Image: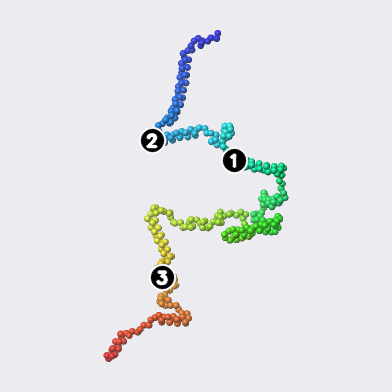
Amino acid sequence: EDATYDEFFDPPTETKQKKKKKKEKIETENNHVDVDQDEENKEEDDDEDIDLENKSEFEKQQIHLKRQIKSIEKDMLSTKSWQLTGEIEGHKRPENSLLEEYLQYDRTTRLPPVITTETTDSIEDLIKQRIRDKAFDDVERKKKTLHDNEAQAYKKEIVLEHEKSKMSLAQVYEQEYMKKQTNDKTEKKDERHENIRQIMQNLFIDLDALSNFRFTPKPPIPEVTVINNLPAILVEEVVPTTVNDSTLLAPEEVHIRPKGDIKADSERTDTDKKHARRLLKHKLKLKSKTQPTKTNPEEQEKEEKRNLLKKLGKMKNVRIEKTDKKRSNEKTARSSTKFFQQLQQSTLITPTKKRHHSDKTTITDSKRLKL
């Protein structure tokens, strides 16, 4: 009853052929996969088994570069670890992974003191000392005394006003200045403190004068004057007061910029060279006029006289008269005594000339004798 046809007879031939085809397909696919794997392994083996001895240095460098490029590509394309992915949440990294890393982070709270042998020894010494003194009482709580309250009273509490004041800044400063100048003061100051401050200020002035090499004068007392007609806001100068005026000058104000473009010696043409030569000659000519030449004093006087004559000749309503050198050199005597002294000097200087008889007189005398 339970017997079947398949148990006693073979299946038809078609099914056997189909099974064979399926087996062949599976085998071919496996062969393709094996071939691909073999090719990859062969490439790796070829890279490793390349004989570098028979190749040039350039080929060796190229092979080395290819290997480096492949290794870098693998690292770039491969999945990175969670440490290199930047900000990461807890569910994206493995469990207890932070325990294996040394982390650096900021703490807002104060760190507890590090317990060392020195701290433990100090605590032990303190406990032993209290046992020796038999001081087993609790630490007394400190309370603020009257002296502490007085110290706080000296500190001025700054009161900030949230409402906008109706007065201007000049009026506010005027009121503060008037309060300082007048004797009506709300706060009473201790006279002893003021005396101590004055004594200390005088002492500091003397010490400053002694400690410095040069004399340091007393600081001037500021004289405050209230000016009403001023704007509420003043723009400050950008330049500090310590800067000298010479440093603020522009380069064109210090040195006159030459006309035209500045050229090198190789760039200059013939016209540029001639122009520079003419300028140099003109400068030397002006310099020679201003500076005195090292010549004889007589020549200098002559040149000065020529220049004066040229200037006077150009002027209108001017007459030039010639004078003798002797008369020009002689000074006019204002008194009678000086006049006679000059006359005496002239007689001494001028030599006495002997009178020579002319030939005419001799001829006339001879004629008279003949007659």
Q: CA distance from mark 2 to mark 3?
A: 92 Å
The residues tagged by marks 1 and 2 sit, at their Cα atoms, a distance apart of 56 Å
**Image point (51%, 10%), residue name:** 7
Q: Residue 190, how many percent across, how many down?
A: 70, 56
Q: Disc 1 marks which residue?
A: 106
**For the point 67% across and 57% down, which residue is it?**
196
The residue to which callout 3 is attached is: 297
Does residue 90 sit above or below 177 in this rendering? above
Write down the quadrant of residue 275 in the picture.
bottom left
For the C terminus, which image quadrant?
Answer: bottom left
Numbered label attached to residue 342? none
Q: Which residue occupies the foreground of this view, 82 or 343?
A: 82
The image shows residue 113 at horizontal and vertical percentages of: 62, 41
Query: Residue 344, position in %: x, y?
Result: 43, 82
- Can you say whether 179 is above or below 128 in the image? below
What residue is pinned by disc 2?
Answer: 56
Q: Residue furthest toward the front?
A: 132
Q: Looking at the image, which is closer to me, 236 or 111?
A: 111
Element on which disc 1 rests:
loop
SS of the residue under disc 2: loop
Q: How is the image coloured?
A: rainbow
- Badge 1: residue crowd in 10 Å (few <14, some 14–19, many ≥20): few
Q: CA distance from mark 3 to mark 1?
A: 92 Å
- Residue type, label 3: Pro
